[in-house]
Image (cartoon, rainbow, N blue to C red):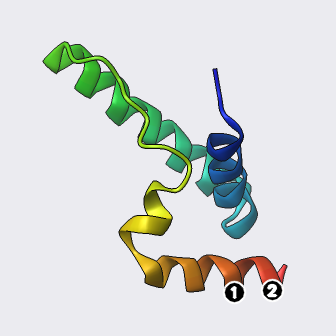
Amino acid sequence: MQTQGQWNDSTYVVRCIPLKKAIVALARCLLVIIVHVLTTGEVYQDFGPTYHDKRDRLQIVHRTVCRLEK
């Protein structure tokens, strides 16, 4: 089940880079998660829709500029 924030993060990747690269990037993210869950046996926990915004404030500027350019 996807939350609104997760959907927005995915559509951000699709809007800012070409479609084929976005598909590969999202597929790689999913593959890394799957491999991690299968090898460690841990349950997947999503960090939430604001994880990246809190982690690095410079990325907010980059994302905002990208959104404004489109």
Give the image location of residue 66, x and y in percent. 70, 80
Q: Are marks 2 and 1 in contact (CB under 8 Å)?
A: yes
Residue 9's label in the rendered image is none
- Residue at point 27%, 20% (across, down): 37
Q: Badge 1: how crowded within 10 Å, few (<14), some, or many (20+)?
A: few
Question: Taking 65 as reference, is 32 above or below it?
Answer: above
- Residue at point 49%, 77% (across, down): 59
Q: Check disc 2 and report its element: helix, strand or loop.
A: helix
The quadrant the N terminus occupies is top right
Residue 65's label in the rendered image is 1
Question: Taking 50 as reference, is 47 above or below it?
Answer: above
The residues bearing labels 2 and 1 have C-alpha atoms spaced at a distance of: 6 Å
Which amino acid, mark 1? Val
Tell which residue pokes out farthest to the left in this image. 40
Tell which residue pokes out farthest to the right in this image. 70
Which amino acid, mark 2? Glu
Give the image location of residue 7, x and y in percent. 69, 42
Foreground: 16 or 56?
Answer: 56
- Name which quarter of the figure residue 33 lies in: top left
Please give left or right for residue 70 compared with residue 1 in the image. right
Please give left or right for residue 56 compared with residue 65 in the image. left
Give the image location of residue 67, x and y in percent. 76, 76
- Residue at point 65%, 46% (across, down): 5
Q: Check disc 1 and report its element: helix, strand or loop.
A: helix
- Name which quarter of the figure residue 64 lies in: bottom right
Residue 69's label in the rendered image is 2
The quadrant the C terminus occupies is bottom right
